[in-house]
Amino acid sequence: MEQDIHRRAEERVERRMGFFTHLVTYLVVNAGLFLAWYFISDHGKGFPWFLIPLGGWGVGVIVHALSVFVFGKFRERMINREVHRIKQRIK
């Protein structure tokens, strides 16, 4: 029982750490793209092309956040309910 709880806690932490790694990478890379655009385009006078990867990748970051912080909890509740049902049938 204790090992199962520890394993589940590790899985949760790994999912969260994966999201935060994704978020930091997104922020660093897109800051670099912004700076590249700013200095290449004569201090912001050109087409803001950095917005294309910023927006596309941003959608991915949002979906990742939802999968970890919203649907991950929903999935866990469903698993707990199913475990409870199985235990009830066994009794």
Image (cartoon, grey):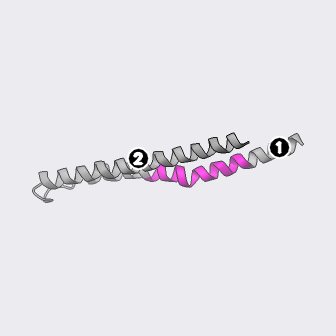
Q: What residue type is labelled 2?
A: His
Query: Could you tell which of marks 1 and 2 lies nearer the N-terminus?
Result: 2
Q: Which residue lies furthest to the right in this view?
A: 91
Q: In this view, does 34 lie to the left or right of 57?
A: left
- Give the x, y percent position of residue 58: 38, 52
Seen at 52% across and 45% down, the residue is 15
3D distance between C-alphas at marks 1 and 2: 38 Å
Q: Is mark 2 on a helix, strand or loop?
A: helix
Q: Does the magenta stretch include residue 73?
A: yes
Neighbours of disc 1 within 10 Å: few (<14), some (14-19), many (20+): few
Q: In this view, does 26 lie to the left or right of 69?
A: left
Q: Magenta region, mostly helix, strand or loop?
A: helix
Query: Can the viewer see residue 60?
Result: no
Q: Does the magenta stretch include residue 34?
A: no
Q: Which amino acid does label 1 sit on?
A: Lys
- Give the x, y percent position of residue 17: 48, 47
Q: In which quarter of the image is the N terminus?
A: top right
- Give the x, y percent position of residue 69: 54, 54
Q: Residue furthest front?
A: 2
Q: Tell me the tag on residue 22.
A: 2
Numbered range of the magenta stretch: 62-80
Seen at 63% across and 48% down, the residue is 75
Seen at 40% across and 51% down, the residue is 23
Q: Tell me the tag on residue 68.
A: none
Query: Can the viewer see residue 24?
Result: yes
Q: Quadrant of the C terminus?
A: top right
Q: Is mark 1 on a helix, strand or loop?
A: helix
- Give the x, y percent position of residue 31: 26, 53
Observer-nearest residue: 39 or 14? Answer: 14
Residue that numbered label 1 is attached to:
87
